[in-house]
């Protein structure tokens, strides 16, 4: 029997959900609002909410002061590049773990995930030195590699979960039909796992786009993405909140829009396999 | 051509011997059914022939050539799976053409073959649909179509009808038998359903715990079971296997009498009381508690008005009693 929910309860639940959602979204909203205020209005106390002096001057200043398109391009190349490279490595890895598991497959998966628990600062110095000595410092290639390695466990885990849902008999049928391992992955497994691969891709692009620790540490000028672009607006003379907010809004806007349009796919991807 | 020979084929998973060693010859054009209870190794044996599992030892020859180490695709066999195993993202046409595409066949020729297969299997109207839009029976036909177009040396069926409802199972059973008569290609069919085995096979291979208990035509197995296992497995309802004084009278450890070979008589024979009666119209099944041989099943032709608690006398038909020794094997 379906559980009956009273109207009162429904209203209460909906209101709570809205409250939590707004609470999470509030910092982003505040940043966007601040970016349209003058510097004086931005630091006014009590905070001005609806009667501030609205202006677009911050955007004009930020645009004039720095080369936004270059940072943007770097962000796109690094986040998309690291995700694609990660997929190329993770698809065969997840395939073997899902369809020809060994005795230690579960341990291997847990170990891969455990690397995500390592504090980044712990490997900062070796990473920095390796990058400097191999010429990868401040290069897009270097960051693509670094972020790919960082997100690889997540990609493998997600793909492994999707692949586990695909019946093994279908792959055996492909083998009987004469498909080589390569053709089996290209013509059968990958098309069947497209929804899973797409959500893995989206989530990892977002993770890589938002990554700040390594992208700021391992770049100076050439490969600096939008995270470094935001950081460059915290000047030694003090913080200019309105300009900083404008820069932040410009940095998060593309990924926010991407996330908004792909939210269905993302939610579906993240809950995949939860209910059979 | 499609002669398959298994020589001392053994398969073990870790320390467990699933197939302790099988020798079997399947002649070209035969319809062979592997039958046995769950876990008897029949599917594993089929998968060994298909190449989806590696043999632990022994040889598999297909058309005179050693195929033991060949990958599945190189064995020239086609398989139909229990779950149909269709590619859900492809249309029926693409599903059927997939093996031809993998073989690098010219698209024109591949289309021609797919259309011909669709025609045989009544799938022409569904060629542009996806598997998700088809019924269970249609899906199974697509799976068969995908197997036919390859023109394989032999077809392997792994419990292909288990997912279908009873009525559809009967009609698909007939379709597969007709297909065999039409194509005359070797078919190996795995099932746990002895009715399927009896109705479809030229030759039945009865398996138990990875061992072949008996190989023979359906009627050979029915009339001359080699041992108590085959006697009990082939035939529905099951053969009555009786031990004790009645068996000893005939010089055997166990005697077997099929339910249809027990006549209801007015006096003499085994005396008993009806426990359960099932009336199917064409037949009446009775479960009788006898004083001489314990519980026995009886199958009487037509409608027999017997109810719970009725007294009854049973007489085994002359020459229809099977005798088995202490080792469970049939006695001459």
Image (cartoon, grey):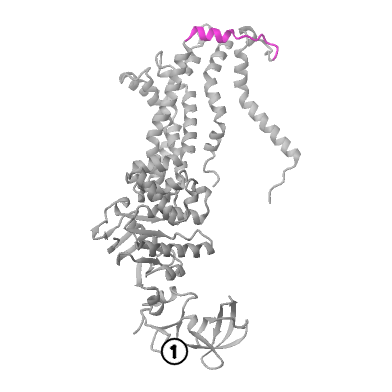
Q: Is residue B280 placed above or below B20 in the rendered structure?
A: below
Q: Is residue B93 visible?
A: yes
Q: The N terminus of chain B lies in which quarter of the figure? A: bottom left
Q: Position of residue A32 (x, y in %)?
A: 60, 17
Q: Is residue A236 left or right of residue B58?
A: right
Q: Position of residue B49 (x, y in %)?
A: 32, 58
Q: Residue at x 46, y 38 (%)?
A: A194
Does the segment drawn in magenta span residue B26?
no
Q: How many neighbours does mark 1 have within 10 angstroms: few (below 14), some (14-19), or many (20 or more)?
A: few
Q: Is residue A23 left or right of residue B199?
A: right
Does the segment drawn in magenta span residue A59?
yes
- What kind of element bears circle 1? loop
Marked residue chain, label 1? B
Q: Which residues are magenta?
A: A50-66
Q: Quadrant of residue B38?
A: bottom left
Q: Residue at x 42, y 45 (%)?
A: B94
Label 1 sits on residue: B318
Q: Residue at x 68, y 13 (%)?
A: A48
Q: Residue furthest bottom?
A: B268
Q: Is residue A102 placed above or below B286 in the rendered structure?
A: above
Choose between B317 and A213: the one closer to the eye.
B317
Q: Position of residue B251 (x, y in %)?
A: 38, 89
Q: Position of residue B42 (x, y in %)?
A: 38, 63
């Amino acid at each position: 029997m379906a559980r009956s929910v009273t109207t009162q309860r429904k209203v209460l639940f909906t209101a709570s959900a809205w409250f939590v959602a707004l609470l999470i979204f509030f910092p982003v909203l505040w940043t966007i609002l601040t970016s349209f205020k003058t510097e004086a209005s931005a630091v006014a106390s009590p905070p001005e909410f609806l009667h501030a002096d609205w202006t677009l001057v911050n955007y004009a200043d930020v645009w004039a002061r720095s080369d936004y398109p270059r940072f943007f391009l770097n962000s796109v190349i690094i986040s998309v590049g690291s995700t694609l490279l990660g997929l190329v490595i993770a698809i065969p890895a997840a395939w073997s773990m899902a369809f020809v598991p060994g005795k230690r497959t579960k341990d291997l998966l847990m170990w891969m995930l455990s690397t995500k628990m390592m504090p980044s600062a712990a490997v900062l110095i070796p990473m920095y030195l390796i990058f400097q000595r191999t010429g990868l410092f401040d290069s897009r290639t270097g960051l693509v590699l670094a972020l790919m390695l960082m997100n690889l466990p997540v990609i493998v885990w997600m793909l492994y979960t999707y692949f586990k849902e695909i019946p093994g008999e279908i792959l055996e049928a492909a083998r009987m039909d004469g498909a080589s391992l390569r053709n089996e992955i290209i013509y059968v497994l990958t098309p069947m796992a497209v929804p899973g691969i797409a959500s893995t891709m989206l989530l990892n692009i977002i993770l890589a786009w938002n990554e700040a620790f390594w992208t700021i540490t391992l770049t100076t000028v050439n490969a600096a993405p939008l995270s470094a672009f935001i950081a460059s607006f915290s000047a030694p003379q003090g913080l200019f909140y309105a300009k900083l907010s404008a820069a932040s809004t410009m940095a998060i806007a593309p990924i926010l829009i991407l996330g908004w349009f792909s939210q269905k796919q993302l939610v579906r991807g993240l809950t995949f396999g939860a209910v059979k | 051509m499609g002669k398959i020979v298994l020589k001392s084929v053994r398969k073990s998973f870790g320390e467990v011997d699933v197939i302790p060693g099988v020798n079997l010859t399947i002649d070209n054009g035969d319809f062979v059914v592997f039958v046995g209870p769950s876990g008897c190794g029949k599917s594993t044996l089929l998968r060994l022939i298909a190449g989806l599992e590696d043999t632990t030892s022994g040889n598999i020859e297909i058309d005179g050539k050693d195929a033991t180490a060949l990958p599945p695709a190189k064995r020239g066999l086609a398989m139909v799976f229990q779950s149909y195993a269709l590619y859900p993202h492809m249309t029926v046409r693409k599903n059927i053409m997939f093996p031809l595409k993998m073989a690098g066949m010219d698209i024109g020729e591949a289309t021609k073959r797919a259309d011909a297969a669709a025609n045989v299997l009544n799938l022409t109207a569904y060629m542009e649909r996806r598997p998700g839009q088809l019924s269970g029976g249609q899906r199974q036909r697509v799976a068969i179509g995908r197997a036919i177009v390859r023109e394989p040396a032999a077809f392997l069926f792994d419990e292909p009808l288990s997912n279908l409802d009873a009525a559809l199972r009967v009609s698909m059973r007939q379709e597969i038998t007709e297909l065999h008569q039409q194509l005359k290609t070797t078919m190996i069919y795995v099932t746990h359903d002895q009715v399927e085995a009896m109705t479809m096979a030229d030759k039945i291979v009865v398996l138990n715990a990875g061992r072949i208990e008996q190989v023979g035509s359906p009627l050979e197995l029915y009339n001359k079971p080699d041992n108590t296992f085959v006697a009990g497995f082939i035939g529905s309802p099951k053969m009555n296997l009786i031990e004790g004084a009645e068996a000893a009278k005939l010089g055997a450890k166990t005697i077997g009498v099929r339910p249809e070979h027990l006549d209801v008589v007015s006096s003499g024979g085994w005396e008993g009381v009806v426990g359960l009666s099932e009336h199917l119209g064409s037949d009446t099944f009775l479960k009788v508690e006898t004083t001489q041989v314990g519980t026995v099943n009886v199958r009487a032709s037509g409608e027999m008005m017997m109810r719970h608690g009725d007294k009854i006398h049973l007489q085994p038909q002359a020459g229809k009693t099977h005798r088995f020794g202490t080792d469970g094997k049939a006695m001459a």
